[in-house]
Image (cartoon, rainbow, N blue to C red):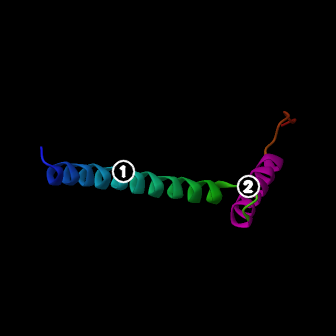
Amino acid sequence: MEYHEKLEEQVAKLKKENQRLEDENASLWFLLDEFEKSNIHNPEYKEMFEEVYEKLRYQSLMTVTTDGEA
């Protein structure tokens, strides 16, 4: 193989590796975004959690747990 062909082969390998690393980087940023959205300290998530908790608490208070006289 002459020098020019080896150089082209190396450039092709580097382009392929660069694409793999860019894909991996994009995946990691996506995961970080998802992690941030699911973080309980995130005000939006915390507000939604508190609303659901209050609804469940209210429903449990409205549930009869003892038998009464008819």
Residue at image location 41% in from the left, 57% down from the top: 22
Of residues 55 and 37, which is closer to you in this image? 37
Q: Which residue is mark 2?
A: 40
Residue 32 sits in quarter = bottom right
Report helix, strand or loop for mark 2.
Answer: loop
11 sits to left or right of 20: left
- Residue at the front extreme? 3
The residue range painted magenta reads 43-62
Real-space CA distance between mark 2 and mark 1, rounded to the nearest whole angstrom? 32 Å
* Residue type, numbered disc 1: Arg
N-terminal-most mark, 2 or 1: 1
Contact (Cβ within 8 Å) of mark 2 with mark 1: no
Of residues 41 and 3, which is closer to you in this image? 3
Q: Which residue is mark 1?
A: 20
**Which quadrant would the N terminus be assigned to in this image?**
top left
Of residues 17 and 66, which is closer to you in this image? 17
Using the image, tell me which numbered label, if any, was put on residue 64: none
Residue 50 sits in quarter = bottom right
* Residue type, numbered disc 2: Ile
Q: Tell me the crowding category of disc 2: few under 14, some 14 to 19, or many 20 or more residues within 10 angstroms, Cα based.
A: some
- Residue at the left extreme? 1
Q: Tell me the crowding category of disc 1: few under 14, some 14 to 19, or many 20 or more residues within 10 angstroms, Cα based.
A: few
